[in-house]
Image (tube, grey):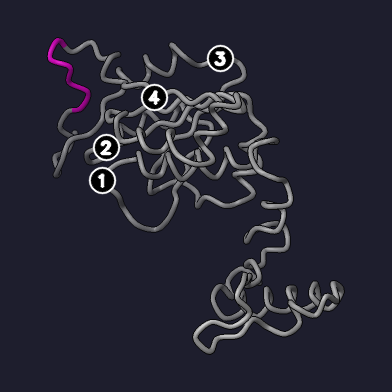
Amino acid sequence: MKIDILTLFPDMFNGFITESIIKRAIENKHVEVNFINFRDYTNDPHGKVDDTPYGGGAGMVLACQPIFDCVKAIRTAESKVILLTPSGVPYKQKMAYDLSKEKHLIIICGHYEGFDDRIETLADYLISIGDYVLTGGEVPAMVLADSIIRLIPGVINESSHLNDSFNENYLLDYPTFTKPAEYEGLKVPEVLISGDHQKINEWRYQESVKRTKERRPDLLK
């Protein structure tokens, strides 16, 4: 897979691609990640990529020309373009699975007050990572890329993500524990050290249901 991230601040991603699982995925050639500064595509002699909004209002709005020209330069028949915006559809685990099957993703990071609305015509997906507003799309782009890359075959053990929260059963993940069996008076549930795998699986399912009811009852709907 190839992921191209369009951003005015490519240096924000330095740590993202040089640590842990993402670093290994790149080194093992499971994924190629590029950062493209769309300021390089502006026709403005001063490098300007934004302007004041028509109709007045606070802040500056990203203009069409640099982003349109940037996307046109790198888009192919296999590309899917994602525009990160608070007005997009909420990001879900199923979307991560679907996007992990694509060959080329282009992720556009916004900044300032927002986009010229005509930029939406470039996008195959309008995505929001939550009901809040950030200073730019760089952090959401990392969220998307991380959630997608870990699902690419060979990046992590498949069983590690099949039991994730938000998979097809819509339940949160069950509690997990490691050694020691007791720490500061807190004990690991007896069933987990019983060796009875059928009872362990039943316990894990019931705990998933319980945790989902308590913390995310909306998922059960």
48 part of magenta stretch: yes
Asked which secondary structure carries label 4, the reply is: strand
- Residue under label 1: 135
Considering the whole magenta stretch, tell me its main secondary structure: loop
Mark with earlier residue (2, 4): 4
Q: Amino acid at mark 2?
A: His
Question: Picture coordinates of residue 151 (x, y %)?
Answer: 64, 41
Q: Amino acid at mark 3?
A: Thr
- Apparent side of residue 49 relative to residue 211 in the rendered image (left or right): left
Mark with earlier residue (1, 4): 4
143 part of magenta stretch: no
Marks 1/4: CA–CA distance: 18 Å
Contact, mark 2 vs mark 1 (Cβ under 8 Å): yes
Disc number lying in front (4 or 3)? 4
- Indicate which disc residue 195 carries: none
Q: Which residue is depicted at the point 67% across and 73% down?
A: 208
- Residue under label 4: 35
Instruction: Specify the quadrant of the image occupied by residue 191.
Output: bottom right
- Indicate which disc residue 76 carries: 3
Q: Nearer the viewer, residue 211 or 38?
A: 211
- Residue under label 2: 111
Q: Nearer the viewer, residue 6 or 80?
A: 6
